[in-house]
Image (cartoon, rainbow, N blue to C red):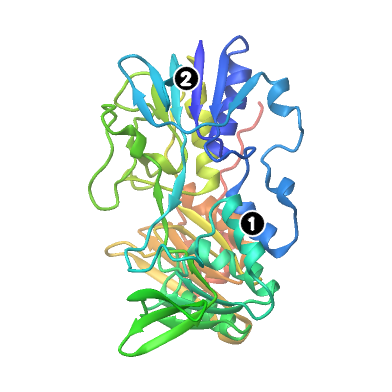
Amino acid sequence: MRHVIIGSGPAGVVAAETLRKADPAAEITVLCGEGEPPYARMAIPYLLKGDIDEKGTYLRKGADHYGRLRIDLVQARAKGLETSARMVDLGGGRKIPYDRLLIATGSRPSREKIPGFDLPGVKTCWTLEDARALLDGIRPGTRVVQMGAGFVGCIIMEGLLSRGADLTILVRSGYMVRRMMNPAASGLIQRWCEERGVKILTRTQPKRLSSKGGALEVDLGEGKTLAADIYLSAVGVDPNLDFLAGSGIEIGHKVGHQGVMVDANLQSIVPGVFAAGDVAESTDCLTGKRQLNAIQPNAVEQGRIAALNMAGQPTRYKGSFVFNVLTTLGLAASSFGEWQGVSGGEFSEALDESRYRYLNLQFDDERLVGANCVGFSEHVGALRGLIEGQRRLGAWKQKLLEDPSRIMQAYVATAVPACSAG
């Protein structure tokens, strides 16, 4: 059996390792599209900060790891896919045959549609190559204007500040990390950042970028401009799926639906072709709705499940669980499930602005269905367990409505007793 995996991020690497265990005699090829050893993008902020070197970003540290498992790493990008012939087109007349294929190509930074975006000094922070360019360009006093304060935009701040950057953040919406935090939680994060020297401009979006006197000029409109040595674009990511044009693989095209449509076994509409990670549009384990859920734990689990199915071991994917854990300049924040709340649902919240602590719980009938928290890192496991486990709270719902900080007690009290051995 010939297994080909397009993509060498967490989903691709875990899939390859799972395949080797499940199918010891198989041929396994992983396409690494960046010319790098398989690495974790989520380790890049630690590289920027100087906590690790480049090898510290590698997913597997042993130099002989892939060779020992007979996993063939090929430094090439997929240019196209011929599903009828079961071939991956690498361009230049080079093709790789497959019996089973996994699409795990991850995401790429969204491109801002503003004049001047191709000027020197305009950068992103998504790949090791991007990180090298930033490390080479930032010195104490370097003026960095960053567009975007989502998950990625927030986790890279500490690395920029640690190298002495003069940092200004532009936020298109009214508040930071709006896709995982409500306004109250976001307000705490913004004030935390501002007290540490970050300038934040909300409801602000550049109109154009231009070069002036060896630097960049960021035009904000209405006569307002900012001078920058680096303009850092961090406005989100899009799935890497362009190479699938004409392949017959179904891709969502509605707003919010842009991934490979997969079934409960993570197989696409084309038999033998699977998808995992940022490119796979699967169902949410709580709501049943289709969605992309681009977080590393989700990618790892999908890679494992897809590989088992590729190896002929039917395994259903229970669905993704929406959660994010974010640390911004040392301040921990997290969101779970339907943190925005549900129609007809109730909520409770606790706020301590002086200590940067905030907890918001969202309920649907007797179940906790979502949460936002800042500074309550000790509750992360309990929150996930209650929400993902869809536990009925009973009398504990009212207790949490009155005091949301009792989340750990609720988690312990509602645990399902283990069956006795007798």
Whether pointer 1 and pointer 2 mark residues with C-beta atoms closer than 8 Å, the reply is no
Amino acid found under the numbered disc labelled 1: Arg
Residue reaching furthest to the bottom: 223
In the figure, is residue 378 to the left or right of 299?
Answer: right
Q: Position of residue 192 (x, y in %)?
A: 58, 81
| Nearest the eye: 322 or 152 | 152
Q: Earlier in the sequence, mark 1 or mark 2?
A: 1
Q: Residue at x 56, y 51 (%)?
A: 127
Residue 321 visible from this viewpoint: no
Q: Nearer the viewer, residue 216 or 129?
A: 216
- The three-letter code of the residue at mark 2 reads Met
Task: Please tell me in which quadrant of the rendered image residue 271 appears.
Answer: top left
Secondary structure under badge 2?
Answer: helix
Q: Where in the figure is residue 96, as x and y percent of width and height?
A: 46, 18
Decide: few, some or many residues near mark 1? Use Cα within 10 Å; few <14, some 14-19, many ≥20. some
Residue sitting at 33 percent across and 20 percent down?
83
Residue occupied by mark 2: 310
Q: What is the CA distance from the residue labelled 1 to the residue labelled 2?
A: 36 Å
Vertical arrangement, residue 242 with respect to residue 256, above or below: above
Is residue 9 positioned above or below 339 on the image?
Answer: above
Residue at the location (57% across, 14% down)? Answer: 27
- Left or right: where 108 falls relative to 22: left
Horizontal and vertical percent for residue 123? 50, 63
Q: Using the image, determine if residue 49 lies above or below residue 93.
A: below
Q: Is residue 161 above or below residue 371?
A: below
From the viewer's perspective, tell me whether residue 219 is left or right of residue 165. left
Can you see residue 78? yes
User: Quadrant of residue 50 in the image?
Assistant: bottom right
The disc at residue 132 is 1
Q: How many marks?
A: 2
